Image (spheres, rainbow, N blue to C red):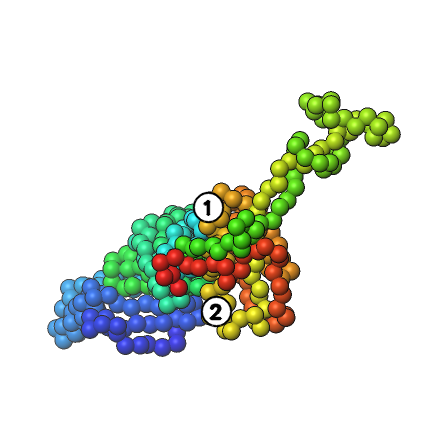
Amino acid sequence: MTGVSGSRSAMSLVEVRFRKYHRAERLTRSGLLFFLAIIGIGAVAINSGNNLLYLVFSALLSALIFSGLLSVANLRRLDVSLDTVDEIYAGRPASLAVRVRNTGSFPLFFARVSVRADGDTVSLSVPFVGARSAVELPLTLTLPTRGRVTGLRADIASTFPFGIVEMRRDVAVGGELIVYPQVHPILLQQQDEQGEHRLERARAGDDGDFFSLRRYHAGDDSRHIDWKVSARRGDPYVVEQEARYQQETVFYLDTARGAWPDSQAFELGVSKIASGLTSVFESGEAIALALPGSFLDGRDRRAWQQAMELMALTELTEDPPHPGPLHSFTHEDISFVNGAP
């Protein structure tokens, strides 16, 4: 025990902190009245020598001690972790799942969990968690900045069993959150009349030039078999041709510190590129993201998530500025709609 501090309010008598165990105890308002009653009855019992008053005094004191012991057991072996329900965007309320796990043999009763993040505290009630079990509860939390979020802390508090003593524990919150950059409605400025901010990629099909050779599979059109290659290799091979080109809207972000006047301008550029990626993906088109040393592309949701994670974690580097790929969108080609920052 490291010390005793003053009350939080006029009705709170004392708070005792156990820093070694990240634990604190304090009397509630009811506990204060209960404590004063114990003192009063004890004083009268000593002055009068009445055995009945001694018995009442002993019972009340035992109840206070028993309440403290149960409150310690109630919060003894608890873990708290956070998991995502949907994508998390900086500056927006995010839906999360809080998992409270009880690894001990004593159940958890009537607790309150308060998660702290960047100066914001969100609380929720946990009525019961059985021994060696866990519960998941929804939580809405707003994280102001993009990036990887770890090392959050949570307070678990309970007045179990009699409402006399409030026990609190400070615990580390498990789990890792990836916060995407801020996303706003945008306008894309086309480079020319043909919209040349696109990357053309060939894929296998049947309406273009030669693409590749592969082994024959049951069901393939025999007209596509290359008999010369098949005779030479001893197995039937099929000629694949190019299909129509798949077009991808390309975005480029230069992470060189020298390419930006300050970090605030860089964060604005990150937000613009992330907004562009999201806008194009939601329209059903394929996306491509280029950063110095990194490139990814695709049309499905996983490709968009990977691009947004890359944008969430990207940082300024000391490398020299790099020109972007030909026909790519940069932050200068993107404008926010309706005066978004």
Residue 284 % position (x, y): 49, 42
Q: Nearer the viewer, residue 157 or 90?
A: 90
Q: What's under tag 2, amino acid-wise?
A: Ala
- Badge 2, how many Cα within 10 Å: few under 14, some, many 20+? few
Q: Secondary structure at mark 2?
A: helix
Q: Which mark is residue 265?
A: 2
> Could one spot residue 70 in this view of the protein?
no
Q: Nearer the viewer, residue 114 or 186?
A: 186
Q: Is residue 104 left or right of residue 253?
A: left
Q: Is residue 44 left or right of residue 270?
A: left
Residue 220 % position (x, y): 70, 24
> Could one spot residue 20 in this view of the protein?
yes
Q: Quadrant of the C terminus?
A: bottom left
Q: Residue at x 22, y 72 (%)?
A: 9
Q: Residue at x 15, y 64 (%)?
A: 52
Q: Residue at x 56, y 70 (%)?
A: 259
**Which circle's residue, 1 or 2, is located before the other in the chain?**
2
Q: Which mark is residue 282?
A: 1
- Name the residue furthest front: 193
**Pointer 1 and pointer 2: residues touching (CB < 8 Å)?**
no
Q: Is residue 262 above or below residue 123?
A: below
Q: Is residue 14 above or below residue 67?
A: below
Q: What's under tag 1, amino acid-wise?
A: Glu
Q: Residue at x 70, y 34 (%)?
A: 241
Q: Is residue 25 above or below residue 162?
A: below
